[in-house]
Image (cartoon, rainbow, N blue to C red):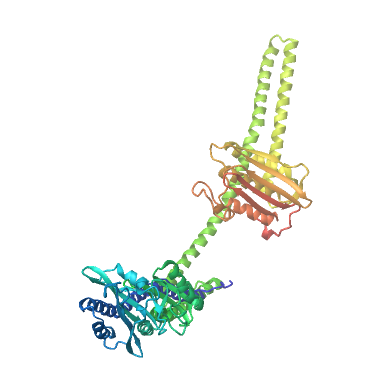
Amino acid sequence: MSKPLLMIRHQINLGFVLVLIMALFVIFAVVEFKVKPDLLQQQQQKIAENQSELVDLINARLGQVEVLTRTLAAAATSLPKNESIFKDLLPSVIDNRGDSSIAGGGIWPEPGAFSKGIERRSFFWGRENGQLKYVDDYNASDGAGYHEANWYKDAMGASSDNCIWSQAYVDPFTRTPMVTCSVPIHENSEFAGVATIDVKLGDITRILQRYGEKNDGYAFAIDSSNHMISFPFTAANIESNANSLVNVNELATHIPWLKSSLLQINKTNETGLIELHNDKLLGEAAYVDLVRNDETGWIIGLVLPRSKMTAMADSMGFFLMLAIGALLVAVGVVAAVLFRNLINKIQQTTVQVRQLTDEETSQTLRTGRMNEMGELRQAVNAYGEKLKSLLRHLEDVQDELVQSEKLASLGALVAGVAHELNTPIGNALMSSTSVLDANKQFSKKMNAQMTRRDLANYLEDVTQGATIIERNLTRAAELIGAFKQLAVDQTSSQRREFELKGLVEEVSLSMRPSVQKSPSKLEIDVPQCISMDSYPGKLSQVLMNLINNAVIHAFDEQEEGTIQIVASQEQADKVRLTVADNGCGIPDERIKRIFDPFYTTRLGKGGSGLGLHITFNLVTGVLGGRIDVESREGKGSCFTLTLPVIAPHLDDSTRLS
C-alpha cells in the first residue's frame, strides 16, 4: 500500500508552522490596526496637550506685553499732558528693565487730544543698539499720519482691556520682524488715542524653536493674515521685502513637502492633525498638529516625526511578536516531542496490524502499557476477532443465499411452466370432456332410432374436439420443450449456439407470472438474426435477475410502468443488450453500490442483496462482457450488457455453476 503524500507527522509540523505564521500575522494585524491607532490617538492627545502648553508659553510672553501696553496706556492718562514729563517717564516703562525683545513703543494721541489744535503729537521710542531712542518722524506734517493707519483704526473700537495684535511685519528701519500690541486710551469714557508696544518675533521664534527641539521636531507660527511669524531658517527665509513677511503661498513654493498642509491652512484656515509622507527637515514621514491661539488668531504648528509617535507601538508589537513567538516555539517543541512519541506508537501498531494482515496469522497485537494506545490495541484485537468470526459467518450465509437465488430462479421457472401449460392443457381437457359427452349421446341414440343428421353431428363434434385437443397438446409440447431447454441451460454451464430472440422469449415466458402480478408490462425488441455462441443458461439467469430487479424495485404498487428488453448488433463481434424501465430510478448515493454483495434496500422484506452481484459476476466472468448502469431519480434505470458474440472459453474451475 502506497504511503499518503503527507503523513500525520508532516501534517503536524506543517500545522505548527501555519499556526505560528497565523499567530504572528494576527499579532501584526492587532498591532497595526488596533494597538498603533490607539497609541497614535494617545500620542495625538499628548501632542494636543503639548500644543496647549506651547500656546500657554506664547500667551504668557504675549500677556507680559499686553500688561506692559496697558500700563503704558494708563500712564498716558494719569500723567499731565506735558511733553517733557512724557519723554522723561515713558521710556522707562517701554524699556521694561532692558527687555531686549521689546523693539519699541509709544503713545499716539487723537488729533488735538494732547495739545489742542495740534493734529500729530505722538511719542515713540525705538530700540537701537540695545537702547531706546526717541523717534519724532511720525509727527511730520507730510504723509497720511499715524491716525490713518490700520492698527490705529482697529484699536479705536476695542475696549481698554483688550490688546489688538497687528499682523506680523518687518520694521523698515531695523529690518526686524515684529508684531505690535495696541491698547486704546480712554479719558472720560472717550477715545483719546492708542498705546503700542512692538515685540520682536525673534523671542517668539526662540520659544517655538526650543519647544520643537524638545519634542524632536520643529514648530512654526502663522498670523491671522496667513503671514509666517516663525519658521526654521534652515528651510526658508520668512522675510519677503522691506516691510512684510512671506505668506503661506510664497512659503509653499520653497517647501514642497509642506505645501499641501500650508495650502490647506490657507484655504480652510482649519486646525487639527495632518500627515506628511516625507518631511525634508526631519528626513521621514511626520505629523503636523495645528492649533489656533484665540488671543492673537495665530495658528501654531508642531511638526513631529512619525517614528516618535509610533515608536511605542512598534516596540510593543516587536515585543509581543517576540514573546508570543518564543512561547509558541516552546509549546511547539513540547508538542512535537509528545506527538513524535504518539506517532511512533501508532507506527508500531500499524506495523503489527500489517503483519497480522500479510501473514494471515492468529497472532494478536501487543497491548503494552494500558494507556489510550494500549486500549486502542486491545480494541483492535477484539475487533479483529469479531471480523474473523463475521467473515466465517458471511461465507456460510453467502453459500446459502447463492443456493436460495438458484432455487428462487428455479421456482420462477416452475411457476412459468405451470402458468403457460395451464391454458393449453385446460383447453385440451375441456375438449376431451366434450368428446366423451358426444360419445355418450351417440351410444344412447344407437340403441334407439338414429338419423343421418345425428351421425353427421356426432362426427363433426368428435372431429372438432380432436382438433382442439391436438392443437392444445401440440402447444403444450412446444412449451414443455422450450421450458425444458431453459431448465437445461439454467442447470448447466454448457455453451452452445442459440438465437438471442428465442432465448429472450423463453425468459419472458418464465417471468410472465411475476410481471403480471406487478403493475408493469414487458416489451421485447430483439432482431431475429442475432446468433450467439455462448452460455444461454447464464445469460437467461442474468436477464431473469434484471427483470426481477425491475419488478421489485422500479415501480410502486399502484404505478404502471414498462420494462423493455432491446438488443442490437452494431459490431460483428459484439451484441448490445439493454434492460430498461421507466420507474423510480436509483439515487446517486446508491448507484455506486448496487453490484456490491449483500447490498439491498429491502432488507427483511425478502431481498438478499445478491441478485445484481451474481449478475455482475456472470456478465464479466462467464459471459466475458461488461455491464453498465445509467439512472436518474424519477426517470428510470437502464442496464446495458455488452457481450461478445462468441464467449471466451473458460476452465471448469472458473465457471459459475
Residue 491 seen in the current view: no
Instruction: Report the side of 336 relative to 554 (left or right).
Output: left
Task: Report the residue at 70% width, 30% height from top.
Answer: 472
Residue 424 seen in the current view: yes
How many numbered marks have been drawn onto this rendered protein structure? 0
Instruction: Report the side of 98 relative to 568 (left or right).
Output: left
Residue 295 percent across, percent down from the top left:
31, 72
Q: Residue furthest bottom?
A: 129
Task: Report the residue at 70% width, 54% height from top.
Answer: 623
Q: Residue furthest front?
A: 117
For the C terminus, give its image quadrant.
bottom right
Looking at the picture, tell me which residue is in the foreground, 542 or 350: 350
Looking at the picture, tell me which residue is in the foreground, 367 or 585: 585
For the N terminus, give its image quadrant.
bottom right
Residue 643 percent across, percent down from the top left:
72, 52
Residue 441 percent across, percent down from the top left:
67, 16
Looking at the picture, tell me which residue is in the foreground, 293 or 360: 293
Residue 203 percent across, percent down from the top left:
35, 84
Q: Quadrant of residue 136?
A: bottom left
In the displayed structure, would residue 18 be above or below residue 606?
Answer: below
Instruction: Report the side of 448 relative to 119 (left or right).
Output: right
